Image (cartoon, grey):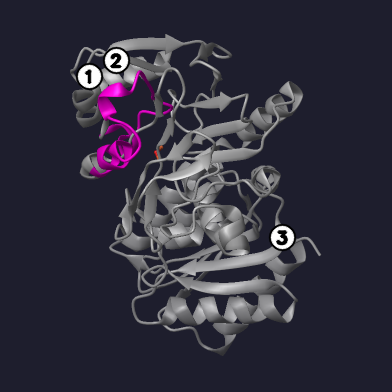
């Protein structure tokens, strides 16, 4: 991707990673981008870098605008390696002694990643840096989503460089929200669900704080995906809605199966939920990626988990999913468990334990059926589905 002038004298100089399909365990079927921004002012300033493999591409992009050696300041909004692993190459190219601005935690974390003794300039929350005609303001956003995370706000141009927040893993030739429209929203939702969900309470506080500060926003420039310029409030409002996690009349029946018995139970539960007007679907854990399921979990009212008993325990994919979901701390859910077993039958109890730990409302002891569900067993699955439907919002 060539640099694009996103506002007078401000360039998007990052790179597109068209082919990445796994981002630390999150499926990125649309690839991603690592965005970085160059501000041409009296002090030429680079905001964020890119993943190491793309560092030369970033330098090439910068070179199309200015000799990289002329960069005066580098801002690091976030230490995670998709934005910082290109930093050594960039600093080497522009000059190891150039001032590097980051949060205090940023300095600590960057020092744990890189041995170079860079010219760190840790900034305070609300601290300002004049770069000539423009001024940058730094806003700490601790734990959104790392301790070092911060935003950089350019007040003269009303641009928020928001690091990971408001991003999307989306590789495309489109650069702005108005060039892609609604098509971007599923990627933004998936990104929120998999990366920011557990910080929902902090997001609500941050939005409140930013609203109180009365920051004018003409553009939000995240470090992944498209830039919000047509309507930056659209993504802010979406974040508020997603953070509230209001449950819908929607149920996910998430399961794995060995010889289709647990699957028969899943289908019967989904049938009953559907008959009761619930938006329900079965999700087989070897056919759905965990990160796509979590996106659906965001607004579901009921999470119904099914596992056969295997070697006195859960089927491995079910354990994998429960571990992943537990870490993301979804709220306001009803939970229920089911599964087929041969002789010992521990799976339902094990799932219930996990759901309770996640503070889900476990509204039924769960249903276990030996070997293959018969008519009576399938009727019991229907009853469970109906019972779940009664608990969901109308
Ligand atoms: Fe895009 Fe937290 O890194």
**Disc 1 vs disc 3: which is toward the camera?**
1
Structural distance between the alpha carbons of marks 1 and 3? 53 Å
The residue that disc 1 covers is 95
CB of mark 2 within 8 Å of CB of mark 3? Answer: no
Q: Alpha-carbon neighbours of circle 1 within 10 Å: few (<14), some, or many (≥20)?
A: some
Specify whether residue 78 is painted magenta: yes
N-term mark: 2 or 3: 2
Q: Is mark 1 within 8 Å of ligand 1?
A: no
Give the CA distance from mark 2 to mark 3. 51 Å
Which residue in the protein does label 2 denote? 98
Start-end of magenta stretch: 57-85
Q: Position of residue 13 (x, y in %)?
A: 38, 41
Left or right: 168, with 330 as reference point: left
Looking at this view, is 262 or 116 the one in front?
A: 116
Instruction: Please indicate whether residue 317 sits to the left or right of residue 366 in the image.
Output: left
Vertical placement of 210 versus 317: above or below?
A: above
């Amino acid at each position: 991707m060539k640099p694009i002038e996103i506002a007078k004298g401000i360039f998007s100089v990052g790179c597109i990673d068209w082919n990445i399909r796994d981002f630390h365990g999150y499926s990125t079927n649309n690839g991603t981008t690592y965005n970085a921004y160059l501000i041409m002012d009296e002090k030429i300033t680079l905001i964020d870098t890119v993943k190491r493999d793309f560092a030369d591409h970033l330098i090439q992009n910068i070179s199309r605008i200015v000799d990289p050696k002329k960069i005066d300041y580098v801002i690091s909004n976030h230490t995670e390696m998709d934005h910082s692993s290109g930093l050594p190459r960039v600093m080497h190219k522009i000059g190891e002694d150039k001032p590097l601005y980051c949060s205090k935690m940023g300095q600590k974390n960057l020092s744990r990643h890189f041995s170079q003794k860079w010219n760190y300039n840790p900034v305070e929350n609300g601290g300002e840096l004049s770069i000539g005609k423009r001024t940058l303001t730094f806003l700490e956003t601790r734990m959104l989503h790392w301790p070092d995370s911060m935003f950089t706000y350019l007040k003269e141009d009303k641009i928020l460089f928001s690091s990971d927040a408001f991003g999307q893993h989306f590789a495309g030739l489109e650069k702005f929200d108005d060039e892609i429209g609604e098509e971007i929203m599923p990627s933004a939702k998936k990104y929120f669900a998999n990366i920011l969900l557990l910080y929902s309470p902090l997001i609500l506080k941050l939005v409140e704080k930013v609203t109180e500060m009365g920051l004018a926003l003409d553009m939000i420039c995240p470090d992944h995906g498209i830039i919000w310029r047509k309507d930056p409030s659209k993504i802010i409002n979406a974040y508020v809605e997603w953070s509230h996690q209001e449950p819908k009349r929607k149920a996910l029946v998430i399961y794995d199966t060995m010889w289709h018995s647990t699957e028969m139970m899943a289908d019967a539960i989904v049938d009953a939920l559907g008959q009761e007007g619930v938006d329900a679907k079965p999700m087989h854990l070897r056919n759905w990626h965990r990160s796509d399921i979590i996106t659906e979990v965001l607004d579901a009212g009921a999470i119904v988990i099914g596992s056969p008993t295997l070697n006195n325990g859960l089927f491995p994919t079910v354990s994998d999913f429960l571990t992943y979901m537990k870490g993301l701390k979804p709220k306001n859910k009803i939970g229920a468990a089911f599964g087929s077993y041969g002789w010992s039958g521990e799976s339902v109890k094990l799932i219930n334990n996990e759901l309770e730990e996640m503070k889900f409302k476990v509204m039924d002891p769960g249903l276990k059926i030996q070997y293959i569900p018969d008519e009576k067993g399938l009727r019991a699955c229907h009853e469970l589905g109906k019972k779940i439907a009664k608990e969901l919002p109308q």
